Image (spheres, rainbow, N blue to C red):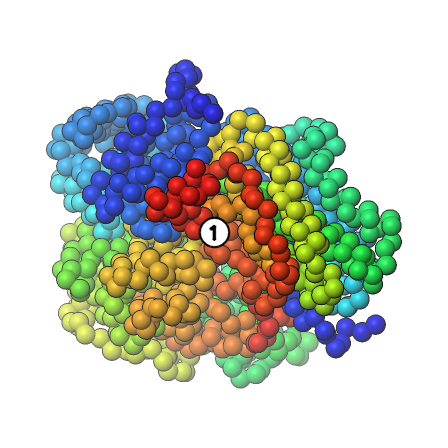
Amino acid sequence: MDIRVKKIDGALEAFNADRINQAIARASRGLPDAVAKTAQIASEMALTLYDGITTTELDQAAINVAAQNIKDDPDFDKIAARLFLKTVYKQVLGDYNTEEELRRAHRQGFLDYIAKQTASGLLDERLAKLFDLEKLADALDLAADELLTYTGVSTMTKRYLTKNREQKLLETPQYFWLRVAMGLSLTESDPTATALKFYGKMKELKYSPGGSTNINAGTSTPRLSNCFLMDMEDSIEHIGKTVADVMKLSKATGGIGLNVTRLRASGSPISTNNTFSSGPVPFLHIIDSTIRAISRAGKKMGALCFYMENWHLDFEEFLDLKQNAGDEYRRTRTANIAVYLSDEFMKRVAAGADWYLFDPKETPDLIELYGADFSRRYAEYVRQAEAGQLRVFKKMSAMELWRKIIVSLQSTSHPWITWKDAINVRAMNNNTGTIHCSNLCTEITLPQDRNNVSVCNLLSINLARHIKNGDIDWDELADSVKVGLRQLDNLVDINQPPISEASNFDHANRAVGLGLMGLADTLEQLGLAYDSPAAYELADKIFEFFSYHAIAESADLAKEKGAYQNFAGSRWSKGELPLDTLRDLENSRGEILSVAKTSTLDWEALRAKVKQGIRNSVMMAIAPTANIGLVAGTSPGIDPRFAQIFSRHTLSGKYLELNFNLVLALKAKGLWEQVKDQLLTDYGSLADIKDIPENIKTIYKDSFSINPLAFIEVAARAQKWIDQAISRNMYLETRDTDEIMNIYLTAWRQGLKTTYYLHMKPRHSAEQSTTKVNKSTAIGKLGFGAVKLPQPVAIPAVNTVSVSKDACPLDPMERLQCESCQ
Amino acid sequence: MNLRPIKYQWAYDLYNQAVANTWFPHEIALGEDLEDWKKMTDDEKHAVTFLMSFFNPSELIVNRTLALGVYPYLKAPETHLYLAKQMWEEANHCQAFEYVLETFPVDRAAIFKWHLDKPAIKVKEDFVTNYLSRLANDRLDINSPEGKKDFVRNLVAYNVIMEGIWFYSGFMVALSFRQRKLLRNFGSMIDWVVRDESLHLKFGINLILTILEENPDIVTPEFSQEIRQMIIDGVAMENSYNQAMFPHGILGLNADYVNQYVQYVADRRLEELGFTPHFKVSNPAKWMAAAMDTLELVNFFEAQNTNYEVNSLANKKSETQN
């Protein structure tokens, strides 16, 4: 078949294989076996061509074919990333022939972009006025694009790069980093110098801001916050207002945590018309529909998590919200759910005691109380219930309810388990009211009420880009923490949250969440197993260092720019630090936390310093970094490697992720080629591959092979130092409910504030396509292999292109005798 | 009749896993896919609708085959349990494709008739129903060698060829859109369908192999040759179907490409039945490693997690699974 290519103007021209081959060859430059790799991509691509294919599709086809080989060699990732980048450059800058031409067009294109898009109103006009643009254009570092992986650049393009109304790209990756840097330097006395400093960190992937900041910084709609935490009151007016606020916040690309414990139970009397309430569930369904309707500017889906305390009378119905069967009107398909547990409940579980559920209409003050105060009041309500003084209550075994929660978690991955008392008792900002919930990703712990929708702004340090000579580059890390915190703090004055309750909170508290990603990546590079005592010690040290420098920088910023408005009365103002609050939690519980309370840095000096003033009411939170981790090309947050090869399904597509550290380690031993097929067959687990040395197996465990207590230990070490919380994903192979109940009980005993998603190892997966599968040999049956057949009839020639080494011989002489080759 | 003692533990295990895999089409939100649909070319839309116009009635044909051609001839209650669950799944798959067709802006009346109008689809349907009618109408004595052979022929037709080759090729085509960042929620639904179909195949192939093992008298060279040829014929039928699905080709896929995939899958089925491979081609769709072969980590608020199991009864240690 003659293949013709349809050009952008609609004209058809004959397919020119040379031109494509040259493009692939350019993308393969400098890689081992570049010629063979180019030829492989070209021949596989030939299979997918068809007459009338467009030039855009041709580019895409080359990228896709390169990407489908990543499973065999990370070099194909480099090729796919370069091919992808080329399409980005072409779209933003037009055609170019040489590298030099590209570099010049890239520099000039930036100046044009700023001029044109500030004039059009897309970008903040200050971007054109406050900066020395020539100086910034000179700093544009096209070579830094080489740091991006295929998944990274592809995710960045789909999510963060600015596009015009026709969805044509306006930004290259470097324009994007620089736009964000400029957008967060607007309030500085030397904006150009500051922007260069921020840009330098981001282009090197030393850190990345959260998604909302990446999307909106530097634009004329600076909706820069990722997280909002709200409280819904028990009145029709406030429920209505909450729905409207959820819409506005979702449109502004924020994820929401929403406390729903206040809503009176079903059957509770409504005084105005002597009828009865339908309970929280139907209202939650409304909010669920609301977030589905708002697609967060098309770049992120509307996302929200309901939080409920488990003494609410309708709590068991709340647990059913994520079931996949049952009345659709009593389910929330899109919204997530989390349970907010008290120490009182956990103690009753441990003691095998009863648990009472109340109508919050009758027990509203429980919502504001925590720790020992909660326990006292709860005991009083229990007394009233037993004395027949409450309209309604439910009594059940605490253990039975705990089991129900865990069974729901196993089968629906909800509710996420979070602890009200660890959050509140340890809060540094406990002078501004009770914290009623965490956020969508369980790493933010801020108070909220009718007048305050709490806001948090995120940025995460990429630890894996702070390694030098086989150790952490501590000086560089301290510098990134400092610069990153300054960038975050600037954000507060530039940010424009979409509702006044959020702006109020933002300005009075300046809450930010400096996070950390790439822990697993770093441990691998340092040769440590995630579940080893050495890793726990290192995590402890890293988070201590991280916390120390973040707090110190916030105190320095306070000296320079003033303390945050609500500073007086905070724990900071008393010279206290996150580590000191561990003791408060122990006192409140009357139990010793099992986490080690040691420290190594000079915290005493810092105590004196924070007493003078601090810039941010809170400053640390370990976000999941599911997307910015991809852009940065590292393992997300403090998560282990899910598997050594797996696929990641996000809004921007489904990507194969291969652990390049492992490939390097195996290539160094000459083992990669012989084990890679089994690695895929074994779903990314090394456990049963016999050729791999034990020390490599120990370091590169997949998440389901790691002792679950390691997830708790690592989080507990980090939580010692972090003033907010941690998105702690859990990964379990066991399906034994009793065992899982114990694992989560341990998490509570270790002082964790929150846990996040629970990943259960699937017991059954679809039949694989690209690996060798044979069910008869697997079960040891012969089938028709039991008969001795006469010689099979000659195979009719099959019209296919063959690229497999199994199918056709590689030796040219043998190929002459091979039917398919001839 | 009593379930215990269980003779075919594998069938009972498959039943338990199938129950844990229960899902419903309405768990998938298709709004985003509708946006994709607007951006897709006519050839791409044709491929998707053509695919569903085959799957939709085929799920029902499999169902009828199970009811009339398999269930009545099996005695072990554990196999009945599995078949009952499989039949529900076929109904559920039919509903799932129905749900998509009712949501997408397509000419439904025309599409629902394609399996009658389009020769490339009709010939496949006729192929399977022909084997079934011999069992359903002629009522052969299942204990005679000829009866057993007919029973095996029917299993090969609906399970190995229809579910194991034709459906598998269709899944590859359906999932290819997600690899291009299109129809990813439809892709999640296909993930679930494939998960179910993988069990159907495990059951079917284990059943065939068990029958052959227990009835060596029918494992003759002639019968063996016949079954092998059936599968090769099934591949030929699929070639003209692929041509009708891809009259021109779309980004990443064309009829020849899909044909090669069909041959690749057919060789696998041949080998699973104890034959040598016939086509000896490689898998052109290496990207299926990302699409289907690996554990999937879901950004849970961005995509439907298809990994969860609903069966909390099974949450005890030492489940006997594969």
The amino acid sitting under disc 1 is Thr
Q: Is residue A596 visible?
A: yes
As displayed, is residue A10 above or below residue A647?
above
A30, A247: nearer the viewer: A30
Query: What quarter of the picture does the N terminus of chain B occupy?
Result: bottom right
Element type where label 1 sits in the image: loop
Q: Which image quarter: residue B19?
A: bottom right
On the rendered structure, is A1 left or right of A533? right
For disc 1, the chain is A
B258, A568: nearer the viewer: B258
Q: Is residue A430 visible?
A: no
Query: What quarter of the picture does the C terminus of chain B occupy?
Result: bottom right
Query: What residue appears at the point 38 percent right and 23 percent down from the top-left corner?
Result: A15
On the rendered structure, is A569 left or right of B275? left
As displayed, is residue B285 above or below residue A601?
above
On the rendered structure, is A684 left or right of A415? left
Query: What residue appears at the point 57 percent right and 83 percent down from the top-left corner?
Result: A352
Circle 1 is placed at which residue position? A770
Q: Position of residue A93 (x, y in %)?
A: 27, 26
Query: What residue appears at the point 37 percent right and 58 percent down from the top-left corner?
Result: A676
Q: Which image quarter: residue B255?
A: top right
B282, A259: nearer the viewer: B282
Query: What residue appears at the point 70 percent right and 60 percent down from the top-left corner?
Result: B219
Q: Position of residue B112 (x, y in %)?
A: 72, 33
View extreme (front): residue: A790
As displayed, is residue A86 above or below residue A556?
above
